Amino acid sequence: MSKKLFTLISKVLEVSETELTDESTPESIENWDSYNGLLLVDELESEFNIKFLVEEVYDVHSILDIKRHLKTHGVVLDD
Amino acid sequence: MIRTEELENKTILVTGANGGIGNEVAKLLVNNNAKLILCYHKNRENIDSLIKQNKGKEKNIQIQKLDLLKEKNIDDALKTILEKSSIDIFIHLPTFPHEHKDIMKTNWDDFQKNIDLQAKSLFNISKHIVPKMKIKKEGKIISVLTSYVVGKPPNGISKYITGKYTLLGIMKCMAVELGKYGINVNSVSPSIVETPFTKKLPSKLKEMTKSQIPFENRLGIPADIANVILFLCKKDSDYINGENILITGGYTMH
C-alpha cells in the first residue's frame, strides 16, 4: 500500500518515486506547493475512498503526516 | 429602482461572451432587450445556444469573432462595427484557461500575453469606441477582474494576477480621465465562481474556500456577477466611477 501511495504522490507532484521518502516535505519537493497539495488530497480521497477533514489537510507537512492521516481513516499501509 | 426598459436602445459590446460569466451577462442583457455584439475567440457554442433560446430576438444579437491578442483584428472589427452604430456600453471579460505554474517557471511572454489579453485589448477597443461616447456625453466601460487584486494572491497564477492588476490600473486611469465626458469606467472582482473556467480547480480547494465564505458558505454563480454588471450598465449606477466592486460573499473585504 505504501508503494501505491508513493506512486500516486509521484504522479501528482511530477517527481520521481526514488526521490520520495517518508521525510519528504513541501520544502524538499519543488512541485509540492499549496495548490498541488490540494490536488494530491483530491487524488488520495478518490483513490482510498475517504474524506479528509480541513484540519487534517492543514496538518500535513510531510509524507509521514499523510500516512498518519490515512491510518486514521482506516487505510492500512504495509510498513 | 432599476428601470427595465432603459437598455432597449443601447448597443453593448461584450468580449468573452462565450465564457461562463460572459454568457450569463449576455442572457440578462438579451432579456433587457439591449442590442448586443457578442465577441468570441475560438468557441461560440454558448452564444449559439443563447440565440436558439431567444427566438425573435436574433436581430438584436450580432456575433463577432475576435482575436484580442491581434491589434489589427481589433482595428478591423471595430471599424466595421462602428460604421453601423456606436457602442454605448463595453463589457470586457476575456481570459485564458486556468493554468497553475510556479512563478519562477513562468516566462515573461506568459505575463505579456495576459497583460495583452486583459489590459491592452481593453485599451485598444476603448480607443475606437470612446470618441463616440464623448460626443454622446455618456458611456459605460466595465471589466471583470478577480478578488485576488485585493490582498494576498494565491500561488501559481502570477501571470493571471499580473494581467488583472494591469487592467485594474488602466480602469482607474480611464475613470479619472473620462469621467468629465459622462463616461463611467468600473470593474467587478469575483472570487471563485462555478464556471467551466474553475471546473478544474481541486475539489478540496473549493470545499475549503466555501467554508470561509460568510454568505451561505457557497461559491459564486455566474448570475451573482452578471446582476452587478447589469446594475453598472444602468443609469442608477452613474455616480459609481473608478470603482472595483468585490463580489465574494464576504470572502474578501476592502
Image: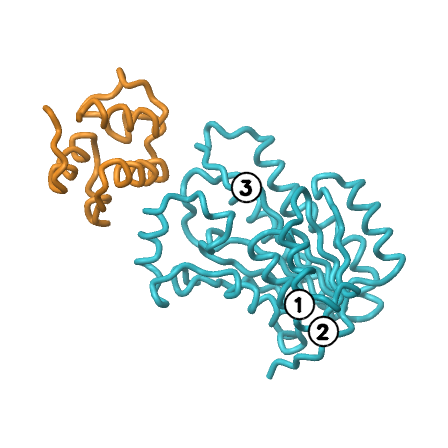
Residue B17, position in %: x, y?
65, 54
Q: Earlier in the sequence, mark 1 or mark 2?
A: 2
Question: Is B160 in front, or is A57?
Answer: A57
Is A50 rendered above or below residue B14? above
Left or right position of A68 against A53: left
Q: Determine which quarter of the picture holds residue B130.
A: bottom right
Residue B145, position in %: x, y?
55, 54
Q: Determine which quarter of the picture holds residue B4.
A: bottom right
Badges 1 and 2, same chain? yes
Mark 1 touching mark 2, by CB under 8 A? yes
Whole-number angstrom distance, CA of label 3 to CA of label 2: 31 Å
Whole-number angstrom distance, CA of label 1 to CA of label 3: 25 Å
Left or right position of B34 against A27: right
Going 66% across and 41% down the picture, which residue do you hit?
B116
Callout 2 secondary element: loop
Pointer 3 chain: B
Left or right position of B52 against B164: right
Q: Which mark is residue B29?
A: 1
Image quadrant containing the C terminus of chain B: bottom left
Q: Where is mark 3, residue-wise?
A: B97
Pointer 2 chain: B
Residue A72, position in %: x, y?
11, 41
Q: Where is mark 2, residue-wise?
A: B7
Q: Colour of chain A?
A: orange
Going 67% across and 42% down the picture, which residue do you hit?
B42
Going 48% across and 61% down the picture, which residue do you hit?
B221
Question: Is B152 in front, or is B246?
Answer: B246
Image quadrant containing the N terminus of chain B: bottom right
Q: Amino acid at mark 3?
A: Pro
